[in-house]
Structure formats: structure tokens, C-alpha cells
Amino acid sequence: MVSKTEQRKIDHIKLCVEKDVAFDKKTTLLEDVELNYKTLPEISLEEVNLSTQLLGKEFSFPFLASAITGGAQVSKKINFDIAKACQEFGIGMGLGSMRAMLENPKIKDTYNVKSVAPEIFVAGNIGVAQLRSYSTQEVNSVIESLNLDALAIHLNAAQEAMQPEGDVNFSNLIEKIDEFSKEVCVPVYAKEVGHGISFEVASKLEQTNIQAIDVQGAGGTSWTRVDALRHKGSFGSVFRDFGLPTAVSIIETKNAFTKQIIASGGIRNGLDAVKGIILGASMSGAAMPVLQAQQKSYKSLQNFFSNFKNEMEITSFLLGCKNIEELHRQNYVVLGKLKEWLNQ
């Protein structure tokens, strides 16, 4: 018998693969960020080294395969393929929500990616609204059994509001986030699911023990759209484009939060990723293009990671930057809607 939670995971994957679940009119606004091209970069492309750390774990280049799935048998091959490719390229991944495993420990194998990729960074994941339902002892038990390196708490008020069964009691959760982040046995970070983190929210998270923020801004996959399609709800068209564009979210979070930032939400290539880093992130991330590549073949997944890395390195070369520290010192120009937004 498939549980409601497991069925939701199956539906989400099916919709993401088969339907148009992107934002309609809203973009990441990263297209409004112009970089300072140096036609004489004064370095060799071979000198570019974008290796870095996230929450103490080494990455060969700054890319995290963002949380996609877990908790359904269909998830196992997806997660294991991604994990094996991440180990091959020296990068990391996030698992989908562990709620299904907390409800039914028998599906642990769909999350157990360290069994095929023991050296990579892997983050577990739990919804902020579920923090009231599970103790830190229960969560720590899952973390230890899967040998996880971090825990992501996903913030998804917009998505929950689209679900008839959604948990929309988001009262007093900042305190709960702080409590969890102090008691969980690995570093904890907060992440949106595709609708962005604002300055106000980042300011509140700065006061907690959270160690990083994954902004997951608007412009990529719209989870209000996904869940509206799942329930054939009328809200889908109203809230499809709701949220803060990724570029806005990175800048606002950087102005409020002093620890690590992950730039994700509509990041589709290495140029976008480097723009995110120049705006203030330490890491880039993506989910939908990783899933789409995996669904085609394992070779397509390898090609996606290889091309993404090459695009980041070429962008850095064209800016005359050998490493992430030099990218963080780069100047940039803001145009168009992004400039209008920031001027407000």
C-alpha cells in the first residue's frame, strides 16, 4: 500500500518530467547582471580552479545537485544515479524530504546514497512545518543511519498553500529552526523550494544557528504550479509566478546574512552560476536540469555536470579570475528590472 506521502513524491516526479512547471513570465533576473569581460584576461584557462568548501566539505567546483526526491521506490534509481555522478565529479547533492522515511523506515534504501557514493557531501531534508512533528532525536537517528553531512530545512509556505492537505501553520517557526539547528548532529541550513528568500527572512535566520541559506529563487521550477497541477486547483495560474527572482534573493540575502549562501532557482548553466557567485553566493545549485538529464541516461547526467563545470571555468577565465575568491571581488553592472527592483 502506497502512503499519501509516497504517492505525493511519485506525482511530483511525474509532473516535473512530463509537464511545463516552469515560471511563466517571471525570470531569475540574472540576465540583468552584466559581467566585466576581459578580452586580455592575463591568465590561462588551465589555471582556473574553482574548488571550494560547503559546510566544511570539499567540492571540486561549486555545484550542489539540489534536493529532488526520496521516499518512493521510483526515487531510488534517480538518487543513486545522481550520487554516483556527483562522486565522479567531486560535488554534492541534497536528498528530497525525509518525511516519508520518518513515517516509514522501510523505504530508507531510496535515500541511502552513501552506499554508492561514500565520499560526497549529502544533505538530508525536512520541511519547516514538520519540525513540530518530529524530535531532534528522531531526525538525528535518520541522519546517522544515512551518514549525512548536513540537514536542510525547507521553507515552502507557497507550496504548502497550494496543497489541500498542506500544513499552513507557519507560526513561531524561527524559534523552532534555531532549536533544531542547535540540537541536530550536523550543520543545518535553510532552503526555499523555488520562490526565494527575502531580506527580512534572511535577517531572522541570521539570528539563529543556521549555517547557510539556499535562496532557491523564482525563475526556474514553480512549485506552486507543480502542486496546483497535482490537485487540478484553480490557484495554479494565480500563484504560478509568485516569489522573489533568484538574483534579487541572492542580493537581499547577502545584505542580511553573514554565512554561506547557495545560489539556486533557475540556474541552468555555468554562466548563471558564476553570476550568482559574483552577487555573493559561495555555491550554485540546480535540480530540474539534473533530473531531466538523469531521465535521459546516465551519460546525459555526466555530460550535464561536465558541461556545467566547463562553463563555470570558461566564464571565470573570461573575467580573469583563477578562483572563487577572485570572483567575489569582481565588479558587475545591474540593468533593467533588477535595477528597478533594487532601487525600490
Image (spheres, rainbow, N blue to C red):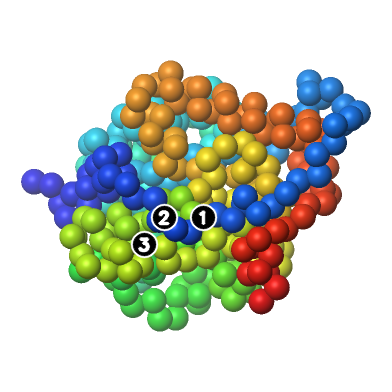
Which quadrant would residue 139 be assigned to in this image? bottom left
Which quadrant would residue 119 be assigned to in this image? top right
The image shows residue 256 at horizontal and vertical percentages of: 68, 70
For mark 1, does the 10 Å Cα neighbourhood hold few (<14), some (14 to 19), or many (20 or more) residues?
many
From this viewpoint, is residue 24 visible?
yes
The type of residue carrying mark 1 is Thr
Give the spatial CA distance, label 3 vs label 2.
Answer: 6 Å
Q: Where is the C terminus found, in terms of image quarters?
A: bottom right
From this viewpoint, is residue 152 visible?
no
Q: 93 or 328: which is nearer to us?
A: 328
Q: Residue at x 68, y 42 (%)?
A: 274
Instruction: Mark 3 and mark 1 in contact? Answer it, CB < 8 Å.
Output: no
Give the residue pinned by disc 1: 27
For mark 2, does the 10 Å Cα neighbourhood hold few (<14), some (14 to 19), or many (20 or more) residues?
many
Q: 125 or 135: which is nearer to us?
A: 125
Where is 44 relative to 237, above or below? above
Give the spatial CA distance, label 3 vs label 1.
Answer: 12 Å
Instruction: Mark 3 and mark 2 in contact? Answer it, CB < 8 Å.
Output: yes
Q: Residue at x 33, y 77 (%)?
A: 169
Q: Earlier in the sequence, mark 3 or mark 1?
A: 1
Give the residue pinned by disc 3: 240
Give the residue pinned by disc 2: 23
SS of the residue under disc 2: loop
